Amino acid sequence: MNQLEQLKQYSTVVADTGDFQSIKAFAPRDATTNPSLILKAVRMDEYRPLLERAVRDHGGEGVDAVADRLLVAFGLEILKLVPGRVSTETDARLSFDTAATVARGRALFALYQAAGVARERVLIKIASTWEGIEAARVLEREGIHCNMTLLFSLAQAACCADAGARLISPFVGRILDWHKKAGGVVGSGADDPGVQSVRRIHAYYRQFGHRTEVMGASFRGTAQIAELAGCDLLTISPDLLAQLAASEAPLARRLGAADAAPAQTRLALNESAFRLMLNDDAMASEKLAEGIRGFCVDSALLERMIGERIGACKKV
């Protein structure tokens, strides 16, 4: 078996893309999207009809409504290709507004339900700020399941689990990026700081019986992926999926349900304790802020494209 086939024995493989052709090629169970991936996709000729259709059918409802329709249109197409779930992200500009995030999550979920999609096949993706985590708490109580993204620390992971989030996406590559930029000694393999972060979270969840799923994300190479074989899920970009499929090197399970791990202290964090613990972690606080800024920029660019198309249609 190639490495991708071997990996699928230990972890659920998820495609991190809005490119339908890549999803077809690698047969993942689930797929994740974000504003950056959707923006990249709608700039491609083969996906522009989704934008044109959303503008044609819903342009009179305003840019926000068209944006939501477009995100869900991609999700619906993806669900035709995967047997599992699709993650659709709320607007990153709402990352510090619990009520607005809840409202946006409900709106996206309602569009999926109106299209006849089963509840279990949709994950609403939310940044792992305090406000985002509280929004997930509300949505999960309503049966709307959440994927908590931009997660870089155990504090975030612990609070997401306590909120009952269905899934978290701890980032691996961006943690490594930060340590490289900081100029310290950066390990590789099992000593990679991004790999270590996910392993610690995975062990913490197992120790305390949390049911929240752990999905490693944001990989910089197949070596990081191999070190996390056995994690509940791994969301992987098309280029790395291709590299795994092209290699027949052995790939062994690295994480398991009964892994021996140093005992950790259970975290029970209120808002002030969460903010202080996150603030004390320079890497996590900086990468969270950076990630939100990046998604905000791409969301604004996507809305600009939508606005230009609405304007063009009005002139016709």
Image (cartoon, rainbow, N blue to C red):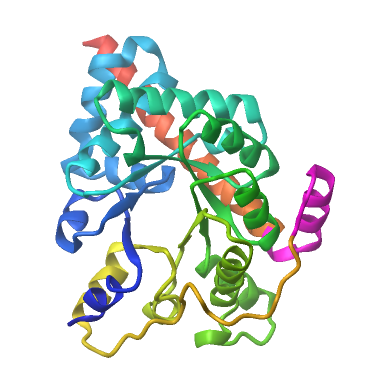
**In the image shown, does 186 or 40 lie closer to the viewer?**
186
Q: Quadrant of residue 156?
A: bottom right
**Residue 169 magenta:** no
Query: What is the x, y in percent for residue 210?
Result: 57, 57
**Residue 279 magenta:** yes
**In this picture, residue 251 sits left or right of residue 302:** left
**In this picture, residue 66 sits left or right of residue 313:** right
Quarter that holds the C terminus: top left
**In this picture, residue 254 sits left or right of residue 240:** right
Query: What is the x, y in percent for residue 34?
Result: 42, 45
In this picture, which residue range is highlighted in magenta? Answer: 267-284
Residue drawn at point x = 35 percent, y = 86 percent: 252
- The count of marks equals 0
**In the image shown, does 189 or 106 lie closer to the viewer?**
106
Quarter that holds the N terminus: bottom left
Residue drawn at point x = 69 percent, y = 75 percent: 182
From this view, report whether residue 260 is shown above or below residue 160.
Answer: below
From this view, report whether residue 15 is shown above or below residue 59.
Answer: below
Q: Quadrant of residue 65?
A: top left
Q: In the displayed image of the protein, which residue is found farthest to the bottom?
A: 249
Query: What is the x, y in percent for residue 38?
Result: 35, 43
Chief secondary structure of the magenta span?
helix
